[in-house]
Image (cartoon, rainbow, N blue to C red):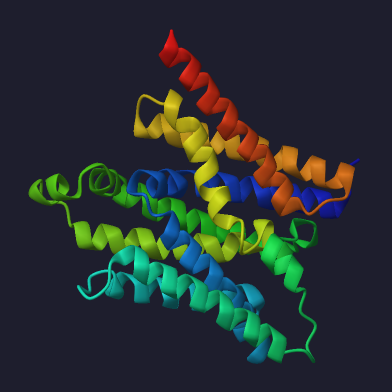
Amino acid sequence: MMEPFLLRALIAGLGIAIVAAPLGCLVVWRRMSYFGSTVAHAGLLGVAFGIAFDIDLTLGVIVVSLAIGAMLVVLERQPLLPVDSLLGILSHAALALGLIAAARLSGQRLDLMGYLFGDILAVTEGDLLWVYVGGAVVLAAIALFWKTLVAVAVHKELAAAEGHNTARAEAALIMLLAFIIAVAMKVVGVLLIVAFLIMPAAAARPFSATPEAMVMGAAGLGVVGTAGGLALSVAWDVPAGPAVVVILSAFCLASLAAAFSLQRR
């Protein structure tokens, strides 16, 4: 019989994998991985915020992540700096501020390595509530805006010409991304969450004929990768987050190799 903490870890990981699949596909299509990195790095600042104000740490991370997401929505439209330069500045500034804040909270109990690399085996029932209730909200929002999100991802100017509200779609995507990164941070950690988002989508892409097929493929690979990474973590006594990413990396390499082989025929 599976230990309760292992069962909770598996349930949390599977929920995150399913919710992350459509967002990961949109991130890959839009080439937005740096947006995800910026929000993820701000997550550590959210942990410090939660400890400092004695609130639930997941709630603290969500508040800070959504604030950073809102800032990105505004700043990406400014003409002074290229977006990639701006994101690089914000990403590393947020990570540095988070590390400094964590160091200043030396009197508090803070598992820094757990937040950097994930600690899925420590998932609680409260964390599961965040994952599944929050995940249901995210999936409902994605379903509501799906056609517009896909249209903007494929060709922003054409989507605008067809009457889609591209500004609202971009803002919605960034805020949904910020929310799910905040919720998933405990599973794979600050430094690896973006890989968890984009790797299943990247592995599914070469063999997907439609956007919906790519989402289903990414979800399946994410589920298998999460379960396999958790098993690897328990068997070898290694951090679960990196173990999941190693499995997903193998899927990406195998997918690219298979696609390259088929192209050469």
Q: Is 120 displayed left or right of 185 in the figure? A: right
Q: Residue furthest toward the right?
A: 1
**Residue that appears at 80% across and 57% down:** 121
Q: Is 132 displayed left or right of 230 in the figure? A: left
Q: Where is residue 206 in the image (x, y as percent from the top left)?
A: 43, 27
Q: Position of residue 225 (x, y in %)?
A: 66, 38
Q: From the viewer's side, name the closer residue of 57 and 191.
A: 191
Look at the picture and state if 42 lies above or below 147. below
**Residue that appears at 68% across and 66% down:** 116
Q: Residue furthest toward the left?
A: 161
| Quadrant in which the C terminus appears | top left
**Residue that appears at 55% across and 44% down:** 18
Q: From the viewer's side, name the closer residue of 46 and 250.
A: 250
| Quadrant in which the N terminus appears | top right
Q: From the viewer's side, name the closer residue of 157 and 177.
A: 157
Determine which quarter of the picture holds residue 66: bottom left
Determine which quarter of the picture holds residue 47: bottom right
Look at the picture and state if 227 lies above or below 164. above
Look at the picture and state if 178 lies above or below 63. above
